Image (cartoon, helix red, strand yellow):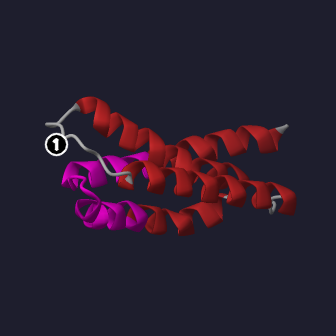
């Protein structure tokens, strides 16, 4: 496997940081309403957000993405731990959705990267 071009990795890193900031803001934004009961929509949003978080690096540099995956899951765990301080609810199922999203984002990114590298 050839090493990815450095500009592509820089772009992936910038996208990943921007997505992490967006996730952090949206998950810690205080909510005036009580936490909703379990909804599948909420879990799907967690899944998609964390799939998107790892996707740019998984496309650009799969090895770095694999190394980044545990940090992404830890990021989701940290968010769940501190959410109550922001008037938000913490849920184990949210963390599970985050972790599954990271796995799906890795897989999708590896496939996309493989297709792009073949061209």
Q: Residue at x 54, y 66 (%)?
A: 68
Residue 7 lies in the magenta-colored region: no
Return the x and y of residue 4 as percentages of the image width and height. 80, 59
Q: Nearer the viewer, residue 54 or 30?
A: 30
Q: Quadrant of the C terminus?
A: top right
Q: Nearer the viewer, residue 92 or 104?
A: 92
Return the x and y of residue 11 as percentages of the image width and height. 77, 55
76 sits to left or right of 117: left
Taken as a whole, is the magenta stretch helix, strand or loop? helix
In this rendering, the answer to whether 49 lies above or below 72 is above
| Residue closest to the far left | 37
Residue 97 lies in the magenta-colored region: yes
99 sits to left or right of 102: left
Instruction: State the extent of the magenta-drawn residues as a range.
Output: 74-103
Residue labelled with disc 1: 34
Q: Residue at x 25, y 65 (%)?
A: 85
């Amino acid at each position: 496997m050839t090493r990815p071009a450095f500009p592509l990795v820089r772009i992936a890193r910038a996208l990943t940081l921007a997505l992490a900031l967006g996730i952090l803001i949206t998950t810690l934004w205080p909510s005036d309403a009580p936490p909703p009961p379990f909804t599948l929509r909420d879990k799907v949003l967690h899944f998609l957000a964390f799939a998107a978080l790892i996707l740019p690096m998984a496309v650009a540099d799969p090895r770095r993405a694999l190394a980044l995956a545990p940090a992404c899951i830890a990021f989701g765990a940290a968010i769940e731990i501190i959410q109550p301080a922001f008037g938000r609810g913490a849920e184990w199922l949210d963390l599970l959705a985050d972790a599954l999203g990271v796995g799906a984002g890795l897989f999708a990114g590896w496939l996309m990267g493989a297709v792009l590298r073949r061209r």
